[in-house]
Amino acid sequence: MAGDLAVDKHVRYFRYALNMLPSSMAQLDATRMTLGHLCLVGLAALGQLDTALSADERRGMVDWIYEQQVQPTGDNAAYCGFRGGSLFGPHEACSYAASNMANVAATYSALATLVLLGDDLQRVNRRAVIAALRHMQLPSGTFAPHPGTTESDPRFIYCACAISTLLDDWSGVDRDRATEFIASCVGVDGGLSQAPLQESHGGHLYCCIASLHLMGRLDALPDRSRTLRWALMRAGTGYQGRVNKPADVCYSFWVGAAVEMLGGHEMVDDDELSKFTFQCEGAYGGVSKCPGAKPDPLHSALGIVGLGFFRPELPRMSPALLLPEDVVERLTLARQAASST
Amino acid sequence: MVRESSEDNIVEPVALPLSEQEEWKDVTPLEQEDSQFSICPIAYTDGYKEMMGYMRAVMAVGELSERAYELTGAVLKENPGHYTVWVYRKKLIEELHLDIEKELEWLESIAEMYPKNYQSWHHREVLVSMLLDARVLADMPQDQQVCHPVIRRELSFLANAIDEDSKNFHAWSYRQWLVRRYGIWEQEKVFIDTMIDQDVRNNSAWNQRYFALVQGETGSKVLVDDGTLQAEIEYAVEIIKRAPNNESPWSYIVGMLLRHAPEKLYDELLPRIQQLSVDASYDQAVKSSPFYWSALVDIYESRAAKEDADAREKILDLARSACAALATDHDPVRMRYWEHRQTTLV
C-alpha cells in the first residue's frame, strides 16, 4: 500500500469549491453544473458525502439544480434539459429561445448530482429531456452537445447514454447507430478516438467503452483484447492519455475505468499507479493533474475515484456511471419496484 | 478615460463601464439569479458581472446589432466556454453579413489565449467553410491549392498552433477537417514527414500519417497498395532505429499491417526487426524495448492462426517466450497482463 489519502483535506477542498470558486474561474461559468457534479463525486468516492453536507445544504443544492431546468415553451424542444449554470438569466426573461439552452453534458451532470443528493427525480421533465436527446443525435450516430454547433463526439454519446440509463428511457438514443459510430472510432492500434481516424485518446476510450457498456453492446468492439491492451499500455507511474504523453491523474479514471469495464482489473500494477496519485495530492487538499500543479475539481474527483478501484476501504464506484455502486443499486431497485406496480 | 500603467509609464485607454456608455443607455442589464445554496458560485469581478448583465439583456430578446456582436467578443474573451454566446455570435455574423476575415483575426486572439477551447476550433471550421467553398479547389492541381490565400492562412495558423504545442489534439483534429474538406493531401504528407523527423515520438503525427495514407477513408473496404505498405515498413524501421524505445512507430506499423496485410507481419516486418536485434549498433536498445517484444507476440500470434497444429504450437511457444521475457525483464509494470496473455494465447 503506497500510503493514505489525506481524506479530511480533500473533504475541505471539495466543500470549499462547492461553496465558492475564485474569479479566475469565470471561464467555467457555463460548466458549474459539471464542477458541482465532480465535487460531489469526490466526496462520495471518499465515503464522506453524507457527513460533509447538511440536509439543508443538500436540499438547497437540489433546488438550485432544478432551477436550471429548461422547460418546453413551444419553440424550444431541442433546448430542453438542464443548463450548465445560472449565467443565462431567469428563464421567463429569455424570450429568444436560443439564449437559454440546456446541453447534454449539463443534463447528465444534473441528473447524476440529483441522484447523489438523494433526490427522486420527480421534478425532472423526463419527456422533454429525452425528446431533446433525439434532436442531438447526428445521422452518423454521434451526438452534439446542443443545437447550433458543429461539435460532436463520444463525450456527448456518453452523456446521452448515462441520461438514458438514469431515466431508464432509451427512446432518445438510436443505440444501433451510436454503436456503429463507436465501432468506427476504433483505431489500427486498438484504441478509441473522437471520430474515425483521429488519434486514440484515453478520454474518448472511456466515453466509448462506457457508452457501449450502458447500451449492452460491448460485443461490438472488433477486438476487445486489443482495446484492453491499448488501455493497459497507458499505465506506468500513473496513466497517460495518449501514446508518448506524460501521465495525468484524470486518466486514472478515464483509462482506469475502461480497464475495469474491459475486465482488466487483475492485470494492473496498482501500487505503481497509486504512487502517482499520491504524488499529485495538493498540500491543502485536492489532487492536481501532475505533481506540483494546482488542484482542480476534475482532477481531484477523478484521481480519487481512479485510486478507489484498488482500495477496498473506499466505497465501490460504478466505472460506467461515475456513481457509488450502492446508489446505482438503489436506482435499479426503485425502477424494478416502479415497474412491478 | 485614460490611466497610467505603473509598469512602463504607458498611458492606455480604458473603456468606460457599459453603464456609463451612451450607446448602452437604452438597455437595462439583466441579472442572473442564484438561490442560497447555489452550486460552485464564482466570485465574479465587477467588470464580468456588468458585461454579463448587458449580454443577457440583449440576448434575451435576440437583438441583432453590431453592439451585441462586439459585446459577444468581450464576453468570450473572459469566458470562452459560454456556449450560447458562440451560437449567438455566429448568428450575428450571418444576419449582419459581417466581415469573416476580421472575425478570423479576432478568433486567433482567442486561440492564443485558449488553445484547447473546443468551441473556438469549431467556430473556425464554420468561418472557413463560409469563406471557401470546397468546389473552388476541386479541379486545381495540388501545388496551386496550397497557394490559395485561405488555405495558406489556415496552414500557417495550424503550423503556429502545432509549433506551440506539437500534440494539441484540437489542432490535429482541425487539420484533418481542413485536409479532408479541401483535398490537400500532398502537402500533408510532406508536413507529416517533417513533424516526425522533428520528434519521432510525436504520436499525433504518426496518427496523421495513417490518416493521410488512407486519404481519410474508413470502413472495411479501404485498401492500401503493396508498394505503399513496403515503403511504410522501411520507414517505420528507419525511425525505430533512431529510438527503439519509442512506442509510436511500432504501434503504427503493427497496427497497419494487422489491418491491411497481416501476412507481411511475419514475412516482411519480422526479418527486419530480427536483423536489428543482432546488429551491434541497435541490438542492446532493441532488445530492451518492450515494444520489440510486444511486436513479436503480435507477429507470432497472427502467424500461428494460419498454421496447422504442429507448426502452430511451435510459433505459439515463441510468442509465449516473448510474453515471459516481457513479464520478467522488459515490461514488469505489466507483468500480470503478460502472464495472462501468455496463458491465453491460442
Image (cartoon, coloured by chain):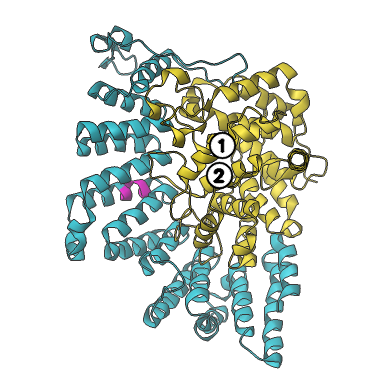
Protein chain holding label 1:
A
Residue B159 within the segment the image draws in magenta: yes
What amino acid type should be assigned to the residue bearing mark 2?
Ala
Q: Is residue B273 above or below residue B219?
A: below
Along the line of sight, the residue nearer the viewer: B147 or A61: A61
Foreground disc of the pair 1, 2: 1
The residue shown at (23%, 9%) is: B22
**Residue at disc 2, secondary structure:** helix
Residue A165 within the segment the image draws in magenta: no
Residue B49: mark in rendering: none
Along the line of sight, the residue nearer the viewer: A163 or B101: A163
Toward which corner of the image does residue A6 lie, by quadrant?
Answer: top right
Protein chain holding label 2:
A
For residue A211, side relative to residue B206 (left or right): right
Along the line of sight, the residue nearer the viewer: A227 or A84: A84
Chain with cyan colouring: B
Colour chain A is painted in: yellow
Report the residue that reaches farthest toward the right.
A313
Q: Is residue B172 above or below residue A250?
A: below
Can residue B181 be seen by looking at this rendering?
yes
Image coordinates for residue B16, horizontal then vertical, percent: 29, 11
The residue shown at (32%, 50%) is: B159
Q: Which residue is mark 1?
A: A127
For residue A230, side relative to residue A103 (left or right): right
Q: Which residue is mark 2?
A: A160
**Residue at disc 1, secondary structure:** helix
Along the line of sight, the residue nearer the viewer: B98 or B226: B98
The residue shown at (37%, 82%) is: B227
